[in-house]
Amino acid sequence: LTATDSAGTSPAAAASFSTPYSTTVTLNVAKSQVTYGGKVKIGGQLVRFLASGGAQQISGATIYVVAKANAGAKLQIFRQLTTDSKGDFSATFAPSANAIYAAYYAGKVGTAGSPGDLPGISIFQTINVAPKITITSKPTKSFHLGAFTLKGKVAPSAKGQKGYLVQVGALGEHKTLAYVTVGKGSAFTFDESVLGNTVSYNVQ
């Protein structure tokens, strides 16, 4: 790079360019299935690959945990975390619905002669959230007379969806007996007859 004025052309100035470091960010989930209200732990590490061929953990970097409701949905920032001295990050939370998560690092801008970091994103991880079904009623005398009532609630809100009463046999076999539409407050009620002397029932 040179400059020219009335005094002539200046000596060429040295230009400094640096190739940014490539980076990788990982994300792992402690469990991929949880009942609504239950907590899961996610965590990962951010690493910089050096020109020498070695690798270095990146500390003090901002990691964005992004989420989307399904494969076709838009990404939303779910958590903002900071890596520790080993480049690690983690968070524990209770997911409210099925979602796909990933960790994103926006990279770091370098200065002349000092390379920055390229952005990186982890592989997406899926967490499935099963509804929590709570049976609130207790057997009464009518249970022994050939009938019983089961009352309960479903979380998260499931108004308008169907709940199924399932008979569980002695060998673990399942048989669907009836279904009801979950009502206001995500509540349900089954009024059924006792089938056999030793029978278990589940609501699904």
Image (cartoon, grey):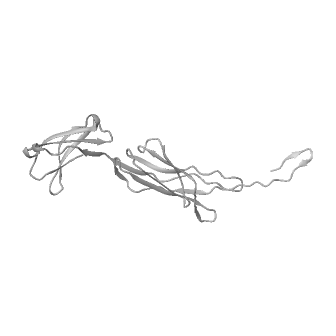
In-image side of 187 versus 15 (left or right): left
In-image side of 175 versus 87 (left or right): left
Q: Residue visible at 84% across and 47% down?
A: 3
164 or 71, which lies in front? Answer: 164
In-image side of 86 versus 114 (left or right): left
Q: Is residue 35 above or below residue 160?
A: below
Residue 17, x across and y down, in percent: 71, 55
37 or 56, which lies in front? Answer: 37
Q: Quadrant of residue 46?
A: bottom right
Q: Residue furthest left?
A: 145
Residue 103, x across and y down, in percent: 49, 51
Q: Residue visible at 7% across and 44% down?
A: 145
Residue 121, x across and y down, in percent: 52, 52
Q: Residue furthest right?
A: 7
Q: Residue visible at 35% across and 47% down?
A: 37
Residue 8, x across and y down, in percent: 91, 48
In-image side of 142 versus 187 (left or right): left
Q: In this figure, what is the number of numbered marks?
A: 0
Q: Residue visible at 62% across and 57% down?
A: 21
